Image (tube, rainbow, N blue to C red):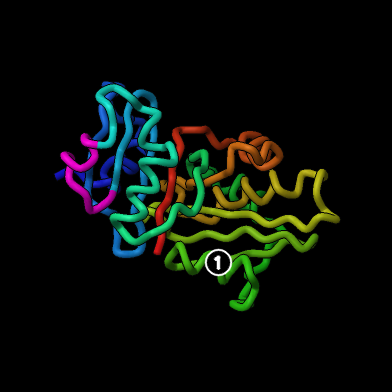
Amino acid sequence: MTTLADILRGIEGGTFPTPDLEVEVVPAPSEREACVVAFTAHIVVAADVTAEWVADRVPAGDLSAPLNPPFLFALEQLTGRRVNAIDAMLLAPALADAAERAIAVDGLTEFTDQTHPRIERAWRYRDGVRAYADPYGGLVVIGNGLAGRLECALEVPERARGKGHGRRLARAARALIPADAHIWAQVSPGNAASLRTFLAAGYTPVGSEALLTS
């Protein structure tokens, strides 16, 4: 049986789901989460529901319905979870060149304050969380999130915004993972500044997701 992890690893390797106007149902990736993820002309519902339950609520060929409030609310009610957000998914390969990696992480130091709000939030959604700080008070946080994928999140203090620090942190995330890996970022579509930051750091939009958490 295909899993969400299989689909995401395939995308990391350049293989996307077939754009067949279908809604695919796969198991929930973990006890912690379920989700609806959208790719070009293909939707994946990763939750402990049946294909029949989904088909009863999604008209054939309607790829907007699974990410609209009525369907997501029904999924919330059935799973006992809540929709955290609907985000754009962005993906980037690791920086493979050793010199590039060294430059990207220059000035970063490991951040170990587990009480920091950004770190506490990361642990709610990810495993193996690591955080690094830059000299300007910015943070880049990395961990294994949805279906085990490597994810990053950034925090740039207001006083340091607009100076390229976010872009440098997003690029640093690509150097803080194994050289043969990929890193994902989830960004609200309305957060144009953050989208521009990740695009400038070499990330590519690959889809959108509605994450349901307990």
The image quadrant where one finds the N terminus is top left
Residue 105 forms part of the magenta stretch = no
Q: Left or right: where does residue 130 sit relative to residue 18?
A: right
Magenta extent: 47-56
Inspect the image, locate mark 1, and give the three-letter code of the amino acid beneath it. Answer: Arg
* Residue that mark 1 sits on: 121
Quadrant in the rendering for residue 20: top left
Q: Which residue is pictured at 29% across the width and 55% down the height?
A: 78
The answer to whether residue 53 is magenta is yes
In the picture as drawn, the residue positioned furthest to the right comes out as 159
For this view, does 56 lie left or right of residue 209?
left
Q: Position of residue 26 (x, y in %)?
A: 22, 45
Is 100 or 142 nearer to us in this picture?
142
The spot of residue 17 in percent (x, y) is 29, 30
Question: Which residue is pictured at 44% across the width and 68% down the height?
Answer: 128
The foreground one among 3 and 12 is 3
Looking at the image, residue 146 lies above or below residue 65: below
Question: Is residue 200 something one can see in this rendering?
Answer: yes
Q: Quadrant of residue 12?
A: top left
